[in-house]
Each structure stands twice: as structure tokens, then as C-alpha cells.
Image: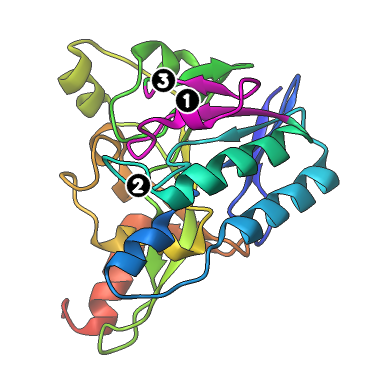
Amino acid sequence: MTTARPILNEPLLLVEGRRKVLVAADLHMGIEHQLWLGGASVPSQTGKMLAGLKLRVGEVEPDRVILLGDVKHNLPWTSFQERSEVPSFLQALSDMVEVEIVAGNHDLGIAELAPPEVSVHPPGGVVIDSVGYFHGHTWPDPEVFRAEILVASHLHPAVRLADRIGSGPPERAWVRTPLSREGLREEYGRDLEGPEMTIVPAYNPLCGGYPLDAATREDRGPIPRMARLDLSRVYLLDGTDLGRLDRIRLVQAKRTGKLR
């Protein structure tokens, strides 16, 4: 039996079945260059992310690491920072463990930056040992929904635990959500069924988070249309179960006075 569980206090997913797989998503290497263009000077996080992943690989001893999209950041071009950091990052990680990438919307040119031993899968996703992996910026291949477990990213899921005036920074979160049969039928023109989907938070802390308590069906690409996010269950990185998203929204509305 294949299982998938978050690593406590880390935005990393451990999938265990015939093989052990460590999943990280949304590294966005090179985001510091974009911040610099906007006037903010932020040190590169690539070294810290590599050190963190190498530490977990040493502890968990996975058979492979899957980087679930948006390994790099800048579009439509590749910055000098990315040309320098992405190949060395991938080489150092692949020296320890088999590495595979599922391409995301920011990964234009990633195959040219990756060492030959790093496999790059298309945005339509891939099924490995009965687990379907896709980034989520585009609709996956319908065969992915035949998997026993679905793992996606792209949303940078987070939740804002607001105070009475509605402030409070978003905290990265895990999401487990059922699929929407209606949404799948609308896109694929036929009935599809699939398992519950796990949405992985962004690994790079500079990415921040997208507060799901404010999300709508039209936001952030296909995932809010293929999933029943209102019925999803939300967990903080420390394992705190915040409950269902629709109830979180209700509590937030009451707390901020938007619902009386």
C-alpha cells in the first residue's frame, strides 16, 4: 500500500510504497533577481534550500526526489542567477539521489539547465508507482486521475489566521481535497473519478503563500476548478489540523466582522 505524509515542520512530502519518494515543490530559484529588479535586496535562498534538502535526503534516504514544478522563477527569460545556481543545485542533489522534475509554468528552459541524469517530465504530469504527480498550472493528462494518490502544487497554499481587524501574515499549509466531478466533466467532456488530492506548499519561503480562505473558483488556474477546495482539509506545517476550508472561512468572517 502506498502512503503519502508530510514531514513535520517542513514543506516536504514523503511518499512510501514500492519506492520511497521525497517531494518538494515551488523552489523558484532566482526569485531574488526579480525582487532586486523591484528594488529589494534579498540574499539568495538556493544554498539554504539545497542544504535543507540534502539534510532530509540523508535522514529519510529516499530512492528519488521529485521537484514538483517551478524549480526556476523568471519568465520568459532565464536570469544569470538561474544559469549559475540551478545547474549546480540539481547536480549536487543528483549526486546524492535520483532526481526528477515535473515541469511547472516557470520552468521554461529547465531541461537545458538540468544535468543529463535529471529527468524532466512534461506539465501534463506523470504516474510513478501508482502516484500521480503534476504541477497544476495546466490540466493534467486524464490518465493521471487513474492513480491511487494525487499530488499537486502551484497554489502555494496558505491560510491567514486573521485577528479582528483582518490582519495577519499567511502561513504555509497543506491541503487535502476531494475532486470535483463537475469540474472534471466540464474540462474533459466525460466523467472522471480520482482519489483525494494533496496540494504541497511552496518550499521557498520567499514565495509566501496564497491564502486559500480568500480563494475563488476562478483563481490560480485549474486546481480550484478540478477540486472541491471548500471541502478540503487544511493543516499547518507543524501538523495542526485547522479543519475544513469552508469552516475556516466562516470563522474568519465572524472574527473580522464580515459576517454577523
Q: Which residue is mark 2?
A: 231
Q: Which residue is mark 3?
A: 122
Tell which circle, 1 or 3, labels the residue nearer the N-terminal end: 1
Q: Position of residue 111 (x, y in %)?
A: 47, 25
Q: Is residue 84 left or right of residue 170?
A: right
Q: Would residue 10 be seen by someone viewing this image from the given angle?
A: no
Q: Which residue is mark 1?
A: 111
Q: Amino acid at mark 2?
A: Leu
Q: Position of residue 137 (x, y in %)?
A: 30, 35
173 or 121, nearer to the observer: 121
SS at mark 3 in the image: loop
Bounds of the magenta segment: 98-123
Q: Amino acid at mark 3?
A: Pro
**Quarter holding residue 149:** top right
As measured in the structure, the alpha-carbon distance from the residue carrying label 1 to the one carrying label 3 is 10 Å
The N terminus, quarter of image: top right
Q: Callout 3 environment at 10 Å: few (<14), some (14 to 19), or many (20+)?
A: some
Q: Callout 2 environment at 10 Å: few (<14), some (14 to 19), or many (20+)?
A: some
As measured in the structure, the alpha-carbon distance from the residue carrying label 2 to the one carrying label 3 is 29 Å
Tell which circle, 2 or 3, labels the residue nearer the N-terminal end: 3
219 or 55, nearer to the observer: 55
